Amino acid sequence: MNLYNLLSQRAAQDRPLRVALIGAGKFGSMFLSQVRRTPGMHLVAIADLSPERARASLTRVGWPLEQYSATSLAAAAKNGATFVTDDAQTTIASDAVEIVIDATGSPAAGIRHALACCEHGKHIIMVNVEADALAGPLLAHRAAQAGIVYSLAYGDQPALICEMVDWARAAGFEVVAAGKGTKYLPAYHESTPDTVWGHYGFTPEQVAKGDFNAQMFNSFLDGTKSAIEMAAVANATGLTPAPDGLAFPPCGVDDLPRVLRPSSAGGRLHHAGQVEVVSSLERDGSPVFRDLRWGVYVTFSADSDYVRRCFSEYGLVTDDTGNYSAMYKPVHLIGLELGISVASAGLRREATGCATGFRGDAVAVAKRDLKVGETLDGEGGYTVYGRLMPAQASLACGGLPIGLAHGVRLKHPVARASVVHWHDVTIADSEAVKVRREAEAMFCDAV
């Protein structure tokens, strides 16, 4: 990797990459803590619905006030400072910006910002995996037509998984499975913002002292975030979901080659070439030995006696046949690593993960029996969670994407654990709906 050298050259030439960040929440704040320490990058602007929150984030991560007191984008670009604003669209359109980071977490906002980047010729780093799971294949297609880079965000698990898959394939291995770890029990699918802290083991005192968002934390626990992220990985890598979605098998790092192999070979996979998430908890709630809760993995096969012998000679952990092995990364650093995507897009015009097709989808499933007239509250809420489905199955049944299951009213009752369909809801014809429908039409024949 020579990104640091390339960045240093840009710094020496006084031609830093000119970056704008949209959304100064947790992920964005982590990037803010590092971008000042990275040569060859200039954060020209931060756009947030609450500029005061953005300024508070800057203060919290150690920025001096004079660094973000620019009075305009033009002044920031000229003086090496940062402009704070609530106007994302004007920021994207500015000639002072060449790379945009969307860290909003809103599917509708992410789609809007990606399309604006296509219009104005700005590379976009999509931290907003919710938007990517909803319409990433179409957004990537539009970006390619516009001649810009559309990229998943390094530091987030989907991009790290994509990197591991690429490594394995570039080394000549067949990728058998790839994914991440999480804390999972079947009962968590019905978790709500009222019950989430008990599942995490947080006391009311801890929650009161911290910067905790119950709905966001619940989306990680109830399986929604895993479904969204694995849909993004499937669409970027060509790996596919099992027909029943994620099984969340309990598995520690030493058991990856044994568990994450096809069922025909004694493992838990439906097929070779699958996305899957492993649980850090056994089904009885006890901890998995050497779990991968914070990490990512890839399993791959040897497919020759010589390579199997090499696996043994060089100490790789394998299954009992010696044919399946694994690599893993035990942790991910989220926004602290985001600069890798910025540098890759700006200096190499390469994405750190990008949809190449429509293979996986995250659809809304009822957490309880839902009645006519109820309003769905989306990711991490009280009414629905996200389930991974093969895109072909999702389109065939008309499943409602989890990214559109917020603020829409039910026209029909939906039973607990059942998929919510487009025809079950009254939904406005918004930009996000139109883009999603266009994506479905464009890729329906391919899936």
Image: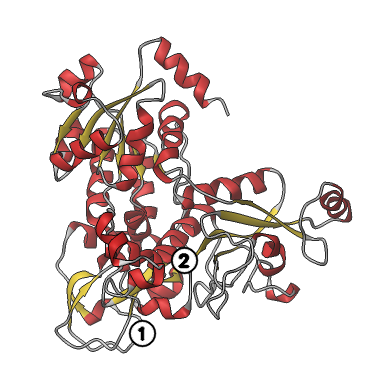
Residue for point 44% across, 51% down = 355
**Which residue, given by chain and number where applicable, does mark 2 sit on?**
447
In the picture provided, is 161 more to the left or to the right than 211? right
Please, is residue 175 above or below residue 48 in the view? below
Please, is residue 447 above or below residue 431 in the view? below
Q: Which coloring applies here? A: secondary structure
Question: Residue 296 appears at what percent x and percent y?
Answer: 56, 54
**Which residue, given by chain and number where applicable, does mark 1 sit on?**
418
Question: Residue 258 appears at what percent x and percent y?
Answer: 72, 67
How busy is the neighbourhood of tag 1: few (under 14 within 10 Å), some, or many (20 plus)? Answer: some
Residue 217, picture quadrant: bottom left
Q: Nearer the viewer, residue 167 or 62?
A: 62
- For the N terminus, the image quarter is top right
Residue 256, picture quadrant: bottom right
In the picture provided, is 283 more to the left or to the right than 398? right
Dot 1: element: loop
Can residue 444 be spotted in the picture? Answer: no
Taking the view exactly as shown, the residue that stands out farthest to the top is 13
How many marks are shown on the rendered structure?
Answer: 2
Give the CA distance from mark 1 to mark 2.
23 Å
